[in-house]
Amino acid sequence: MKLYPLFLEHPIICTDSRVCPQGSLFFALKGDNFNANAFALSALEKGCAYAVVDEAEFAIDDRFILVDNVLESLQQLAAYHRKQLGTTIIGITGTNGKTTTKELMAAVLKEKYNILYTQGNLNNHIGVPLTLLQLKPEHQMAVIEMGANHPGEIKILCEIATPDYGIITNVGKAHLEGFGSLEGVMRTKAELYESISTSGKLIFINTGNPLLQSMAKDSGILDSDKKTGYSLAAEDKEAMYSAVITECSPFLYLKWNKKGNGPVEIKTHLIGAYNAENILAAITIGDYFGLTNEQIKDGLENYIPQNNRSQLTVTEHNKLVVDTYNANPTSMRAAILNFAQMEVPEKTLILGDMFELGAQSEEEHQNIVNLLQQKGFKNVLLVGKDFKKTQNSFLSFEFVNELIDYLKENPISDNYILIKGSRGIRLEQILSFL
């Protein structure tokens, strides 16, 4: 790996020619609408020490490193660096909850270990290598989030990160435009199980989830000793770890126990019963890696959700349950059902379109509207072209700015308001009007 000595001298990676830390390595990546080879010289002029390019015409002096493919070189460098350090890697994927679970795992593990974990949503074929290249010898563990919207992508990320441990939070209907079906989602997510089965040590599995059980069985790992189970199902005898929800109004409290041990109470700052599985996953992993009950409790109770994920925001006029980071049919349904169970006097729902559902988009949006009607919700505001096509009696708006105009004329007060939709709808823009 000829690039590796250069990386050790210049361990800061840059992929944006507008932000060039002094002495960094610039990787000239390509996209559908850009070719960063054209900006390599500018990156050097702004402070980068070397530029990695894959078009010979731009390699005009010895500060340019010419390779066959910049992206592949970045991925190979990250894989090589990961192997040189030998850091314990936990890979995490799933349709819903993977980012929250990653954050909870990190909050717990930080109580004992020096860890690196994926920041934001750097969980794709570029983000995973960039995260791995931040590994330092002092890091004892790393939690690497892996996202996918097409078949085979988790396999590629596993080949780069070679995780020692793995967890799939769940599987559901998301990115159907790329996967084609729920079965396509399952096959792709299961690539993490297959990686662990072949070259890893152990998976953490929600044994109460029949889809995950099926995927683990097909991967040849379910009947091996490479698994530790957790479950919210009281009758689940396979689970080493279990929990029961004790309160959810609005913050989620639960009691958990390990087989043979008494319960431990956890009071979180998370909203939504659907987060109980995410919390239990973090508990399972924390205990497996030797944290005390107190360390696990401290890590979880001190965690404050951010980035508009399962987050309670109290304004002068309302209490907002904000979950505008992403949305798909599974997570939208879970959020609505949880909101229906909340015992508060006045409720309003503001929901935005769910993206990347392909041919199933019309049906899935109508299913959500039908659920709202079944649950008897009256105060519902829908945003987006797909929701606007559904058959319902709710107010709907094609664009978020139209909703903002409505809220200015018809302010809402003294309500609990659920706000959920795909990022592209940009529902976060309405928060200042509530």
Image (cartoon, helix red, strand yellow):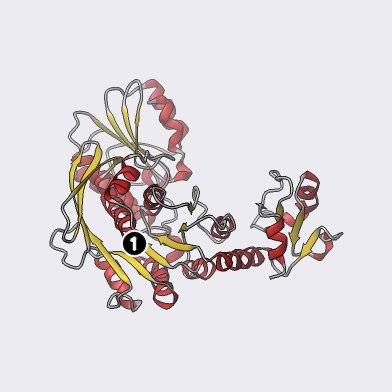
Instruction: Tell me which residue sits at (37%, 38%) in the image.
Output: 304
Rendered location of residue 287, percent (x, y): 30, 57
Location of residue 90 (image quadrant): bottom left
In the image, residue 404 above or below residue 152: above
Instruction: Tell me which residue sits at (31%, 25%) in the image.
Output: 318
Location of residue 259 (image quadrant): bottom left
| 107 left or right, relative to 162 | left
Front one among 245 and 267: 267
Q: Is residue 35 visible?
A: no
Q: Residue furthest right?
A: 61
Instruction: Tell me which residue sits at (39%, 76%) in the image.
Output: 197
Q: Residue furthest left?
A: 235
Rendered location of residue 253, percent (x, y): 22, 42
Q: Which residue is mark 1?
A: 171
Callout 1 secondary element:
loop
**Mark 1 surroundings within 10 Å by alpha-carbon count, few (fewer than 14), some (14 through 19), many (20 or more):** many
In the image, residue 48 above or below residue 211: above
Amino acid type, mark 1: Val
Front one among 347 and 216: 216
Instruction: Tell me which residue sits at (75%, 50%) in the image.
Output: 48
Rendered location of residue 122, percent (x, y): 52, 53
Q: Is residue 384 visible?
A: yes
Rendered location of residue 174, percent (x, y): 39, 58
Q: Quadrant of the C terminus?
A: top left
In the image, residue 77 above or below residue 366: below
